Amino acid sequence: MKAIAIVTLVSDELAKDAPVAIGVSGGKDSQAAALATFRYLDSISHGGPRILVHSDLGVVEWDDSLPVCERLAKHLGAELLVVRRNAGDLMERWEARWRSSVERYEKLSTVTLVPCWSTPSMRFCTSELKTHVIRAALKRRYGGRLIVNVTGVRRDESSARAKASIADREAEQPIINWRPIVDWTVQDVFSAIDTSGVVLHPAYRDFGMSRVSCRFCIMSNIADLTAAAAQPESHDLFRRMVALESASSFAFQGARWLGDVAPHLLDEKSQRALATAKVKATERALFEKFITPSMLYVKGWPTRMLTDTEADILATTRQAISGILGFRSAHLDRASIHARYAELIADKAVRDARKRKVAA
């Protein structure tokens, strides 16, 4: 097995028997990271607690993902802590996000519709359903003790991860994030798993997937989406996700509609709904182009009142989009838009005053 990457930031804490928590998803990289980490900890006679942590994302998960983690834990003789988001799984989060987006748009609490799906730049699927949930569970278990949190991030996975450090200390949490296989190649990963006797997730060699996360991931390429759709266990989820594409008029991957990956899995009604959604998406985008950059949402929005011309643009756009998508929107003319902005600015001033009072 290839050597791991380590720095004194990590080794100093391991020498003090700091707790080690290893995130496992069922994918190859987390398997390899767990195997390599346990081997290293044994070599230095680490006496602190060790635990594997799996965040279950619900119906979007492969059927084999949790069993793979359970077998890995048994192989290592470690406890597997399984955590879940109390407010619902990832699919429910996407659906709830769309309902919230419609409500906010109808009330003019946002300028444009907010997409329901996670995106590469807005991965709330990771932050809300994995990172936050895992952090809370570890805090309950270990209190204020400093924890070494292990992930299977590798630099050759992507241009973004190419910049990953071996380890870093979180500013607001007693956590050190350690990436022991950051310099490993994919061949190193498969070799470590194959020689360990641990069973690899079947999605790689049986299903033909290049990566294992959710069945349908926002980061997946077309080959992986196609391979996922070919598995019977994915069909109900596929139809549910396409139904959300049709209801929202937002494609799962920006310009790529999940429904186009396996249209044969949809009945005629669903195919018609998807075709209509694509038309609505085009029309929505055409009208949203009239909104100028200075009118768009920024932190602290709204930061100013709109001009009469801007209010007219927003009114026309809201009328059109509400008609296209069947919304019951308020504030569809210049006067009511000005009134709504004045209300929002006044509410913001009150909130800011409260924050200043608390800070003082």
Image (tube, grey):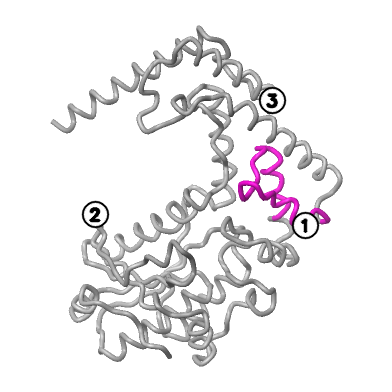
Q: Residue at x 56, y 23 (%)?
A: 106
Query: Left or right: 126 with respect to 348?
Result: right
> Label 1, on which residue?
262
Front label number (1 vs 2):
1
Q: Amino acid at mark 3?
A: Gly
Q: Earlier in the sequence, mark 1 or mark 2?
A: 2
Q: Secondary structure at mark 1?
A: loop
Q: Position of residue 236 (x, y in %)?
A: 72, 56
* Magenta extent: 238-264
Report the residue that reaches farthest toward the right. 268
> Label 3, on which residue?
326
Q: Earlier in the sequence, mark 2 or mark 3?
A: 2
Magenta stretch: residue 203 in it? Answer: no
Q: Is 148 situated above or below 238?
A: below
Q: Amino acid at mark 2?
A: Glu
Q: Position of residue 123 (x, y in %)?
A: 48, 52
Query: Which mark is on residue 63?
Result: none
Q: Residue at x 69, y 52 (%)?
A: 258
> Label 2, on which residue?
172
Q: Position of residue 169 (x, y in %)?
A: 25, 63
- Separation (CA) of disc 3 from disc 1: 28 Å
Q: Are marks 2 and 3 in contact (CB under 8 Å)?
A: no
Q: Are marks 1 and 2 in contact (CB under 8 Å)?
A: no
10 Å crowding of disc 1: few (<14), some (14-19), many (20+): some
In-front residue for pair 136/209: 209
Q: Amino acid at mark 1?
A: Ala
Q: Residue at x 46, y 64 (%)?
A: 159
Front label number (3 vs 1):
1
Magenta stretch: residue 254 in it? Answer: yes
